[in-house]
Amino acid sequence: MKNRLSLLTLFIFLLTGFLTAQNGWTPLWNGKDLSGWKVLGGKAVFEVKEGVIVGTTVANTRNTFLCTEKEYGDFILELDILVEDEEGNSGIQTRSHFDPAGNNGEGKVYGRQCEVDPSWRRWTGGIYDEGRREWLYPMQLNASAQYAYKPGGFNHFRIECIGDEMRTWVNGIAAACLVDTLDRKGFIGLQVHSVSNPANAGKKVFFKNIRIKTTGLQPLPLPSGIYVANFQPDKLTAYEKKDGWQLLSGERAGKNWISARTKQYPVAGWDFRNGAITVLSSEGKEAANGGDIISREQYSAFDFSFEFKITPGANSGVKYFVTLNEQTSGSAIGLEYQVLDDTLHPDAKLGRDGNRTLASLYDLIKADKQKRFLRPAGSWNFGRIVVWPNDKVEHFLNGVKVLEYIRGSKSFRDLVAISKYSVWKNFGEAEKGHILLQDHGNEVSYRSIKLRRLK
């Protein structure tokens, strides 16, 4: 009986391969052995059982990858994966590479990975840069897709790598969209993750129905509202433009920002050259040089995204719902996404419980962030502020949500009452306002500033 089942499985696999080939699809795996693949990185075991690739976790080893010997450029890949351990992890490497000298000579696989994450975190479909930059698209950037993965069974994945764009789909639901200029070609790999608890060794990951298309590529249309992590500076994709995003930096930066003091183009203290908006140093003197700049337009509900690079010890901020009604002598008043060098600037130790640190709602709510998602001074980080029509506000840092609150709520007003903002009536509750880039006297650069109005 077992032999008959094996023959039937093989027959079905061959028939599926024949039929899919008619539409430009070809099997990426022959269905019977691991010819054309090689194991890299760790010591987990891969084998074939009844038409399925089975990977088994092993204690005391690194992440292990079953990788194609052939490299691929543009492609669409589909496969089904089952992760036995609901607290385990797996992934699909795309356009990846191997450094035999990495990990002290043990070898290192590196490149973009479509995450498979059955745990409570629910980041399946996110994009991780294995062995290099780590998280590029945490799934908090598209929270509506976090429940696409169904634990306990096979899940269907679709990965589109076309040009600089990588899109992932989980069980037919659009998960992540990334634009990245690294790696136009590389191998495809199936991951068995390392296990931190030796008791979890022996758990299995199953891979089947692996097929690829490399010609006649037609990406699936993305539904509206999918956030694009776009690492091409100051550019929007065709999808972003169609979805209502506007670029506020780049070539038109000078036309989108004006001085908060004069309401004219800032003539000093700011540099709009070299693909970035840079506030120049005035040795830490707040608003003493060029002063703050504000967006020409005002906004109510919006999704606002920006990259920023601080110099060591620098302080700045992105403020929103700025009305300029307060008539301050220094920086204008508004809700503030703090931009700060937490290590070297003394403001990080002021306030209450860290509510003046990087990505915090300044002087009100501390950003809950992990060190692994922080990039040092001199590197580009990206922030995101989302203000929903119901007045819920979210702050993100490098793709991870670090805080949320509701404007005008009792808890919000209670925080305002014990803050520096208590002297201003209805602080932070304006119907609309400008977005502001702060001159705090230190050199800080901004780029890839984009905004989408929300309804």
Image (cartoon, rainbow, N blue to C red):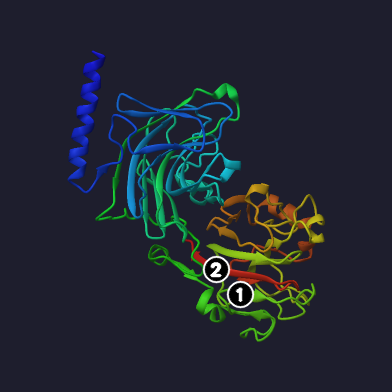
Give the x, y percent position of residue 388.
54, 57
Count of numbered circles in the view = 2
Q: Residue at x 33, y 55 (%)?
A: 221
Q: Nearer the viewer, residue 425 or 440?
A: 440
Label 2: state its secondary structure.
strand
Q: Which residue is mark 2?
A: 449
Is residue 333 shown left or right of residue 136? Answer: right
Give the x, y percent position of residue 15.
18, 34
Local packing at callout 2 (Cα closer than 10 Å; few below 14, some 14-19, many 20+) is many
Local packing at callout 1 (Cα closer than 10 Å; few below 14, some 14-19, many 20+) is many
Label 1: state its secondary structure.
strand
Q: Quadrant of the N terminus?
A: top left
Is residue 286 shown left or right of residue 211? Answer: right
> Quadrant location of residue 377?
bottom right
Q: Are marks 2 and 1 in contact (CB under 8 Å)?
A: yes
Q: Which of label 2 and label 1 is nearer to you?
A: 1
| Earlier residue among tags 2 and 1 | 1
Give the x, y percent position of residue 338.
69, 61
> Quadrant location of residue 438?
bottom right
Q: Relative to 410, is 201 above or below? A: above
Q: Name the amino acid, label 1.
A: Ile
Q: Which mark is residue 35?
A: none
Is residue 295 shown left or right of residue 96? Answer: right
Q: Name the amino acid, label 2.
A: Ile
Whole-angstrom CA distance, mark 2 to mark 1, is 10 Å
Q: Which residue is mark 1?
A: 277
Give the x, y percent position of residue 54.
40, 28
Is residue 433 visible in the rendered image? The answer is: no
